[in-house]
Amino acid sequence: MSYRLDKYLALAGIGTRSEVKAFLKKGMVTVDGQLEKKPERKISGEEIIHFQGREICYEEFRYLMLHKPAGVVTATRDQKEQTVMDLITLPGKKDLFPVGRLDKDTEGLLLITNDGELAHRLLSPKKHVDKCYFARVEGPITEEHIQSFAKGLDIGDDTPTLPARLRILSSGEISEVEVTIQEGRYHQIKRMFEAVGSSVCYLKRLSMGSLVLDENLEKGGFRRLTGQEIAALQKGNREETDNREVCG
Ligand code: URA
């Protein structure tokens, strides 16, 4: 990263480029403890910058994990409904967006970011990124269902679903299962269970690639990803890309 100081401060939300220039002139900014008045000073991201004594940190990319509750729509804005972005009580969130869509009644892991490239790679079915869900479904679930999910199901689209993993946690009048898919078609899990004569009563996303829902997050809560979580997501993505290139 390399920015002019005035651009860096403007990106950090201190003010417009011209306001920032005026603040610099007035001596309101220090870089690594030294007064800095030059707007053209280069910033690499390693420096410690203060504005009026307050440390300023601008991150180009931001990554948040939201524990989506039921009853909230996955959208950046909506005329009538509460959206997942309404739950993100952070300043400067206007460039953030949810990665993929969970239905209004689905709970669980939702990644919120401004990193479009990462989002694209996580969502592309060609990248085969696992999305794992816990589901409660109607009726007994058997080995036969496992086979059907593994083969791919006709859910009324042009092509059958990609192979999916079904793990039975309990089977009965209401069964509990874990399902892992590599796509994100509209209502995909619900339609997959309908295709085998069942229906979903409860759905929660547990993970997306290497990113696992933090069960300490209460429903509706969010937190920043740790450096390790971000690195793992990016590494996962790079490996997917590299493998595909090697395999053609
Ligand atoms: N599949 C569904 O049916 N709904 C979701 O919210 C996510 C996956």
Image (cartoon, rainbow, N blue to C red):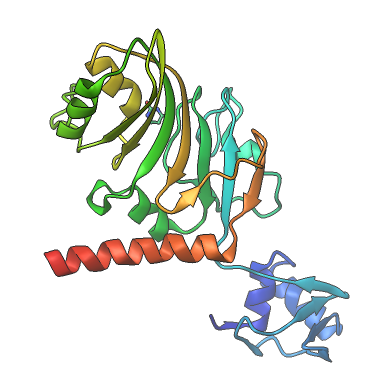
Q: Measuring from the top left, give residue 50's x and y in whole percent.
A: 80, 78
Count of all numbered marks drawn on residues in the image: 0
Q: Measuring from the top left, give residue 101's x and y in whole percent.
A: 43, 36
Q: Is residue 229 left or right of residue 185?
A: right
Front residue of 186/39: it is 186
Question: Can residue 31 be seen?
Answer: yes
> Residue extending furthest top?
173
Q: Is residue 123 left or right of residue 88?
A: left
Question: Can residue 187 be seen?
Answer: no
For image coordinates 56% across by 67% down, the residue present is 60
For image coordinates 51% across by 40% down, the residue present is 109
Q: Measuring from the top left, give residue 122's x and y in whole percent.
A: 36, 52
Q: Measuring from the top left, give residue 177's x and y in whole percent.
A: 39, 26
Q: Quadrant of ligand 1?
A: top left
Front residue of 146/49: it is 146
Q: Quadrant of the C terminus?
A: bottom left
For image coordinates 66% across by 42% down, the residue present is 216
Q: Splitting the image into 4 quarters, where does residue 28 fall?
A: bottom right
- When the figure is inspected, residue 100 is found, relative to residue 40, above or below; the finding is above
Q: Is residue 170 left or right of residue 142?
A: right
Front residue of 184/201: it is 201
Q: Splitting the image into 4 quarters, where does residue 244 fall?
A: bottom left
- When the figure is inspected, residue 234 is found, relative to residue 40, above or below; the finding is above
For image coordinates 20% across by 37% down, the residue present is 163
